[in-house]
Amino acid sequence: MADQLAMPHTATPAASLRTPSADIYAPQWRNAIFVAPFLFFFTTLLLFPLLWGIWLSFHKADTFSSGNFVGLGNYVRLYHDKVFLQSIWNTFYFVLLTVPTLALIGLFLALCLNRRTRTAAVLRTLFFSSSVLSVTIVTLIWRIVFIPNVGLLSTIYGWFGATAPAFISNPSLAMIGIAIATVWWCIGLPMMLFLSALQQIPRDIYEAAALDNANRWQTLRSITLPSIKRTFVLVVIIQIVLQFQLFGQAWLMTRGGPNNLTKPIVLYIYDTAFRRWDLGMGAAASEILFILILVAAMAQYLVARNKGDRV
Amino acid sequence: MIMRKMLFAAVSAGAMALASPSLAATELTVQRFFGACDADFSTNTDVGKAVGECGIITSLINKFNADNPDVHVSVTTVEWPGYDQLTAQFASGDAPDIVTIHESALSDYQSKGLLMPLDDLLKSVGVTPDAFTDAARNGATKDGKIYGLPIDSWTMLYHINMDLFKQADLVNADGTPILPKSPEELLAQAEQFKQKTGKPYFVQNLANETALYTRNLYTYLFQQNSDFFADPKHVKLNTPEAKKVVEMYKAIFDKDYTTKDLDYGGAINAFLAGEGGVQLNGTWVVGDNNAQSQTKGTALNKGGYAVYPYPQLFGGAHAQYADGHTWAVSQKDRTPEQTAAIGKFLKFFADNDFDWSRTGHLPAYKAIISSDAFKALPHRNTIAAVADLGKPLPSAVQRQFAIQDIIGEEMSAAITGQKDVDAALADMESRVNELLANI
């Protein structure tokens, strides 16, 4: 040890003169080891199923055999299937019901609760707490609220001698019922994202506004909202992608009924592929959902690019 | 270090010694629906004490485990009917050994070679198909072989609150309920019931329901001799006969002769609370309803409980839709011990079918259905007729559960007024045929 310490330092520069230093950025095969675990899971769990799904969508296949090539046959069947077209509309309707509501209520809650009081902290926790529940618990809670005769809603309406709206079985209310449960369940994430955005706005801008005698409305419109614009877009796009995948709430609350009015695309896929064993057509419907979500993701990319920076 | 190794070896040897008795028992996996009731019956082996489908089946399996120390059955309970899960299990090669399958769903799995033919196995334990009732035997036979051990035949019934029927003056001199003999009579009696009691005649679970609608349609199509599944690959539902049935139920809905927004659990509670005259439900609630009627203070205790097959409303065959439950065995490589253990399990259920028939289901064995013990069970004098009336769909019809969903959805749309009756019938027919054409 002492010998090493005592070694003259001149040895090092001499060695580096003899061998040129390696270019650490040069491509080397062993670097692949670092990405191999990711690549393995990416290929087996994402890429392979994706390609297999596309392959299946061109075949007449059931759960226990992959049958004949039918070209675009499954897609043609989907095009003529009223229930599938209904399920696309249902999915868009659901996104339309939930995403703006989630964004606006999330923003409103964040604005109200963005303060350093204990009450605000407790309320933040309360509003976020529903997000940690599983979909089964959430739908169970809302079924207890909506169930006719003995549900919470019926009881409250009963006090005033009125009949509660049938949120689970009325054709025009069923999707709204599912949307209410979903907003209650998902409100935590938008609220938290808005809160973190609000807390990043520099205090000095508000101080400058106060010096300029700006009132609260002016401060909100000219400082707060423009500062969190990017977060707003982020929240909307995250929620669009999430709500497009509606399944559990619809399956557990209404089973897609009445008359398929609450059947979203994912439930249609489940029904077709796993309950009717028509795997090829289920795969074709999945590809359509994939394209729809891809469009939403591309929109995110375009919005981000046009703004000149990343969301 | 040596001490540690020795200790480890000693512990391992001890664990092996402790584990060996259970290693000797042959493990069988059983998967069933009928609900979970471990809180009440998880350790009960006295089957006579159990009531209801769940209680009786749980106690029967407990008793089987207790009586057969060389076999250990572990049970997975699935939500009714559990076929999505079962299909996935088959697809991943992880199917249970023994599983509850409806006779109407057997052909889906049998046609794919996923189930084991049971003729030889049953013969080896002394159970022969000629002991089955005709309905059970036909239901469990596919392509000339037995693919499930039938445990019952079931159908839908008129469960009647006699107190409300008395209030509505719908009781004969001998105390039996007056039931309709035509669609017109049904509507007239329902109106009379509503006028006199202020309550709906029917308690139905119509909220996002499909099975009830479909079974009602099948029953009244049978009663009009409509051979809608003459070709098992092509259904004919856009017919005047089907229209008559849908319009009858639509009139019942439009005139408020039925509860409307209830789900299955809600409908049971509503009937038990005396909120309507007739609940349309299956054989499986006869035991529970009868127990309620014997409990003081309940709505069914007030004036009594009666239960009947669906009334004959049309001039055709005397029939109503029926199905049955079976224990099916998955196709797998097994040791002779495992196969023998499965045989024992099936034999046990064949031997104890009387206990299962206490649920309200009709037994699957001739000897039991004609036994005095069965006849002595409450209400069996009125519902035993179902053994002759019961009629399933032709056994070659596949995907009967998926078909049930389609028919139920379209009927619901027509009856609740979301769709024109003709449009619903046309859509029903084309959707079912599209499904069948693509199997």
Image: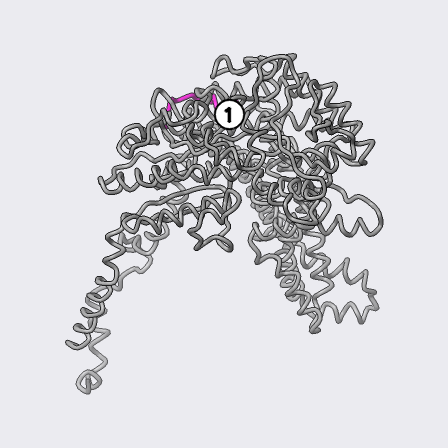
From the image, which quarter does the N terminus of chain A lie in? bottom left
x and y, in percent, of residue A257 in the image: 63, 35
Say which chain tag 1 marks. B
Task: Return the residue at label 1.
Answer: B387
**Which residue is located at x 70 percent, y 69 percent?**
A120
Q: Nearer the viewer, residue A227 or A65?
A: A65
- Residue A96 in sight: no
Query: From which residue to which does the magenta span run?
Result: A65-77
**Considering only vertical position in the picture, is B276 above or below B230?**
below
Is B298 rendered above or below residue B424? Answer: below
- Which x, y percent locates residue A126? 65, 63
Quarter of image, res B267 = top right
Q: Nearer the viewer, residue B196 or A52?
A: B196
- Where, by quadrant of the figure, is residue B272 drawn? top right
Left or right of residue A51, residue B255 in this image: right
Q: Residue furthest left?
A: B2
Along the line of sight, which residue is nearer the eye, A118 or A13? Answer: A118
Is residue A74 on the magenta stretch?
A: yes
Tell me the kind of residue under disc 1. Answer: Ala
SS for callout 1? helix
> How many residues crowd around disc 1 within 10 Å: few (fewer than 14), some, or many (20 or more)?
many
Image-based side of B172 in relation to B110, left or right:
right
Residue name at image x 26 percent, y 32 percent: B124
Rendering colour mode: one colour
